[in-house]
Image (cartoon, rainbow, N blue to C red):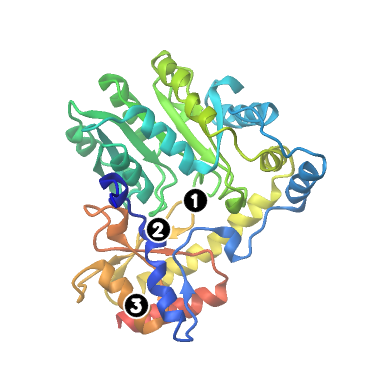
Amino acid sequence: MKVSKKVAGVEYAIRDIVSAAREIEKQGKIVDYLNIGDPVQFGFQPPENVKRALINAVNDGNNFYTQSEGLPELLDAIAKKENSKGLSISSEHVLVTNGVSEGLDMIISSIVEDGDEVLLPGPYYPPYASYVRLHGGKPIEFEVDLETSQPNIDDLKSKISSKTVAICLITPNNPTGSIFNEKSLKEIVDIANEHDLYIICDEIYDKIVFDEKFTGIGKVSGDAPVILLNGFSKVHLMSGWRIGYIVFNDSPKLDSIRENLPKLARVRISTNLPVQYAALESLRGPQDYITNFVTELKKRRDYVISRLNSMNNISCSNPKGAFYAFPKIENNRFESDKEFVLELLKQKNVLTVHGSGFGTKYGNGHFRIVYLPNMGILESSMNKIEDFVR
């Protein structure tokens, strides 16, 4: 039977690689999973007040369809949070989604038609390219310097064509941990204004930063056509509850998409209501657990980066945020970074993700490590990787 070419072309390296690990487990071996960026799977849990808010919402009978845009109180809280980072919006500019992924799908389907091009920071989070292709577009990578953590503005400009419709930013970045500074963000906003391009900015890791203050794009957006993506999976440790949101900047250029994109929200009815009450509590309640989470992650980052840079034929830039390392394979004796990853799994039972799964141009020759596991697992995994590359 027929299968759409669009769907057949969808890839997600982070989860696709898991099938190889399952084959190893069938042999009775234990696999060190360093592939999925899910803090909850590694022992980090939402605080008790947030869990109670979910349970109370269920027990209080809040189990019905809510309005498609989201729980009004949550919309207000999200607007307040994003305004504190530099935007100037009301709750009418916010739309709650079933995770950031649904929000991204809604945005891309609203702006991309056959042949359109979308600029992505190389390396990039795989669903960005997948959704662009799914809706008939073409992802185009622009260079990001992993050492300075900044985009190559000249390269970005050179990639703009008559078919370009949007520039996507992911800051802090998955898979590299790069964070764009205020100067770079302002330059990109100016470019978008000059060429009438949307800016789609993913700030899901906005509070997971280690060495310097995070600057949100809202601080420099002015009235540019900026669409912000954020959610509760990472910072707020609610990954399995699947809740995110879209924020539209208060720009006249966004009037049409602000009118039309919510139709997609109505078609899918609504987002999980009890979880929205939990998300509301996560914004209103104590925030000290975030500080504790980030402090612990910094220890793990420092350890992993130090170990990687001490290994033969491995080099790794220092991630400034999120919880990923993206080491480069020097003098790879295997045919590809994917073969390197599969051989590491086969020989040492350590699962990482091949860098080319994050973009063949700038991800190639790397692999991604998640440093969420406890220090015992990380030490064991680093020992195995060191022995493998030796």
- CA gap between label 3 and label 1 equals 31 Å
Where residue 2 appears, as percent x and y from the top left, is 28, 49
The residue under label 2 is: 318
Q: Looking at numbered disc 3 in the image, what kind of residue is underneath it?
A: Leu
Q: Residue furthest front?
A: 1
Residue at 54%, 68% in the rendered image: 373
- CA gap between label 1 and label 2 equals 10 Å
Whether 125 is drawn above or below 162: the answer is below
Q: Nearer the viewer, residue 350 or 14?
A: 14
Q: How many other residues sit within 10 Å of disc 1, few (<14), some (14-19) or many (≥20)? A: few
Mark toward the start of the polypeptide (3 vs 1) = 1
- CA gap between label 3 and label 2 equals 22 Å
Residue at 42%, 52% in the rendered image: 177
Which dot marks residue 32? none
Q: Nearer the viewer, residue 115 or 100?
A: 115
Where residue 253 appears, as percent x and y from the top left, is 38, 16
Quadrant of the rendered image containing residue 176 = bottom left
The residue under label 1 is: 211
The residue under label 3 is: 344
Q: How many other residues sit within 10 Å of disc 3, few (<14), some (14-19) or many (≥20)? A: some
Residue 287 makes an appearance in the image: yes
Relative to 80, 186 lies left or right: left
Q: Nearer the viewer, residue 261 or 141?
A: 261
